Image (cartoon, rainbow, N blue to C red):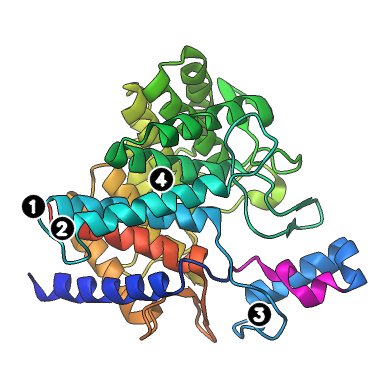
Amino acid sequence: MSKLKSNIASNFKRLKSYCEAENFKGWDPYDGMNSKVFQALPLKHWDLARLAWIQGFKRSPINFRKILLVPKEHNTKGVSLFLLGYCRLYQLAKNGNDEFGTKEEILQRINELSDLLLTLRSKGYSGSAWGYNFDWQARRLFLFKKHTPTVVATCFCVEALLESYEITKDERVLKETLTAADFVVNDLSRTKHQRGIIFSYSVEDGNNTVINASLLGAKILSYSYKYTKSQEHLELAKKAVSAACDLQNEDGSWIYGLLTVQSWIDSFHTGFNLDAIETYQQNTGDQSFQIYLDKGLKYYLENFFEADGMPKYYHDKTFPIDIHCPAQVIVTLSKMKAFQANEALLSKVLQWTINNMQHKKGYFYYQYRKGMSSKISYMRWSNAFMFNAMAHYLLETNSK
């Protein structure tokens, strides 16, 4: 094993040990309103106070969660990312590399996390759906109560559970997971746009035209088509992909969403878009969007990563560097079968991230800034994303 691969493997083990010791529970950038102190105050009924409280927790480089009684909890998206990572580790063990656990040990973990995800579903919707474990005030426009399902959390859970099904062949997991397509079809609103539609972010009104969220709805429906051959789901998925491709800029970039305050272009949401369109094509056999993928991948690689591997957040500025950025590029390029062609860059990105954003205890930092960086350990936002990304990297580089 090369010195680089050995270094990455040892740092992944530190991350893995840390997350397992915490039982995959932790804090989140947006969990401020879980504070028992805040919940005891009348301020919780005021939208501006809720917004200020959440943003204060998110932006502060000092972690006040322990003294303000914010509990460490499971986050559905975080659990799904860990499950995806363990599915990669299972493939490694199956290929003869049990450095990160035997097949039997990893299979037990896959079953445990799959069962946990199914118990964390939000109740009262048309199909399986997942939300977050905290109230979230998004600007002054709307309040998402905890466990309000979103298409983003749901899609990550669907992909992870279906990958676990491919390993375990547990028909219960398959059956329960595929009902998420009914959540997309019946519970999300749709906005018409040119050739297609845009699925809403959530069942709550107010965030209805976010491009990556709509594509994740299409991704869920494409998985349904893969297993059920539902023509309705195929047609709706294609409409959502068509709308997103119509919204792609000529240079291959995408803005985040159609509200005037959502016009930025960033790294990891670009990665989400590419991953979702690629997944749609793989699941349906419809290759008609390849030109948009090619253009988008070229823009992604040319605009968000420095020569030394430092990832940029936005297309036109670097800071703050968010841990999602180095994590998502590894996952996206693996999905797009573009890892091997770009391995040199991805290795630099991962090594830069380990050198600059990993604590000696194994966990990863939230953001890297010019001034005071946020070195708080966030289980979903930082550690789960890097766990999944590093597991992808290890599988890719051990499969030659």
Amino acid found under the numbered disc labelled 4? Ala
Disc number for residue 160:
4
The residues tagged by marks 4 and 3 sit, at their Cα atoms, a distance apart of 29 Å
The residues tagged by marks 4 and 1 sit, at their Cα atoms, a distance apart of 24 Å
The residues tagged by marks 2 and 3 sit, at their Cα atoms, a distance apart of 38 Å
Q: Are marks 4 and 1 in contact (CB under 8 Å)?
A: no
Residue at 49% over, 68% down: 379
Tell me residue 72's x, y (percent). Answer: 59, 71
Among the two numbered marks 3 and 1 on one chain, the one whose residue lies closer to the N terminus: 3
Disc number for residue 98:
none
The magenta region covers: 28-40
**Pick the front one: 229 or 111:** 111
Mark 2 highlights which residue? 397
The residues tagged by marks 2 and 4 sit, at their Cα atoms, a distance apart of 21 Å
The crowd level at tag 2 (other Cα within 10 Å; few <14, some 14-19, many 20+) is few
Disc number for residue 65:
3
Disc number for residue 400:
1
Q: Secondary structure at mark 2?
A: helix
Q: Secondary structure at mark 1?
A: loop
Amino acid found under the numbered disc labelled 1? Lys
Q: Secondary structure at mark 3?
A: loop
Among the two numbered marks 4 and 3 on one chain, the one whose residue lies closer to the N terminus: 3
Among the two numbered marks 4 and 1 on one chain, the one whose residue lies closer to the N terminus: 4
Q: Is residue 380 left or right of residue 346?
A: right
